[in-house]
């Protein structure tokens, strides 16, 4: 049995048996504002920065990488959907105009994939730089596996 499945099964049984019903704080929101691992010497400074909308430089970089990756994925998905619509519209036509249109669509699709690969290559370089900035190894990001990302979107 898969470990994740085993854990899920144990949690489901405990829920059914009501073992989670009378826990301290049941039904109340979690307080995630305080970081129990935060250095007390930095707590006040971090709190002031947070309340005034400031984030550390490395966190801004991480957010930008995530946003850029999402935009690159969306662009590839739009191109994929456009290609499918164009090919569907051409149907089984084999005339010269249809052949020319298919060639154009295929060229555009190759360009879209090349742009996606180039963007993720740039983002991998940004991730390398980000990983040098983060304060803890646990906050480092894995680089994108470009071919895996492509396969997920295709």
Image (cartoon, helix red, strand yellow):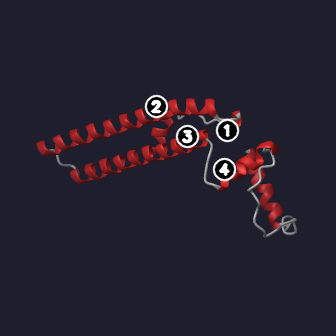
Using the image as rendered, state which of residue 136 and residue 147 is in the foreground. 136
Helix, strand or loop for disc 2? helix
Look at the numbered disc 4 and give the secondary structure of its residue: helix
Of labels 1 and 4, earlier in sequence is 4
Q: Which of 103 and 45 is in front in this view?
A: 45
Q: Which of marks 2 and 3 is nearer the N terminus?
A: 3
Q: Does the rendering let one see residue 142?
A: yes
Looking at the image, which residue is at 81% across and 55% down? Answer: 10
Question: Which of marks 3 and 4 precedes in the sequence?
Answer: 4
Q: Which of marks 4 and 2 is nearer the N terminus?
A: 4
| In the rendered image, the vertical position of residue 16 relative to residue 74, given as above or below | below
Q: Residue 100 carries which label?
A: none
Q: Name the residue under label 2.
A: 121
Foreground tag (1 vs 4): 4
Is the C terminus in the top left, top right, bottom left or bottom right quadrant?
A: top left
**3D distance between C-alphas at marks 3 and 1:** 12 Å
Question: What residue appears at the point 62 percent right and 32 percent down from the top-left corner?
Answer: 133
Q: Residue 25, how many percent across, how many down?
A: 84, 66
Q: Quadrant of the N terminus?
A: top right
Residue with the mark numbered 4:
49
Tell me the tag on residue 61.
Answer: 3
Task: Identify the mark at residue 139; answer none if there is no mark.
Answer: 1
Tag 4 near tag 3, CB within 8 Å? no
Based on the displayed image, in which of its 4 quarters is residue 2 positioned?
A: top right
Percent of width and height locating residue 37: 80, 44
């Amino acid at each position: 049995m898969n470990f994740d499945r085993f854990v899920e099964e144990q949690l489901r049984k405990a829920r059914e048996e009501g073992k989670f019903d009378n826990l301290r704080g049941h039904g109340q929101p979690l307080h995630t504002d305080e970081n129990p691992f935060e250095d007390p010497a930095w707590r006040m400074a971090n709190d002031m920065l947070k309340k005034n909308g400031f984030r550390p430089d490395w966190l801004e970089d991480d957010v930008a990488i995530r946003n850029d990756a999402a935009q690159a994925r969306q662009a590839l998905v739009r191109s994929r959907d456009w290609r499918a619509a164009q090919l569907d519209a051409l149907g089984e036509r084999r005339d010269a105009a249809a052949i020319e249109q298919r060639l154009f669509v295929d060229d555009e699709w190759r360009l879209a994939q090349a742009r996606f690969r180039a963007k993720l290559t740039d983002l991998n370089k940004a991730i390398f730089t980000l990983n040098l900035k983060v304060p803890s190894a646990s906050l480092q990001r894995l680089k994108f596996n470009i071919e895996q990302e492509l396969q997920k979107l295709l």
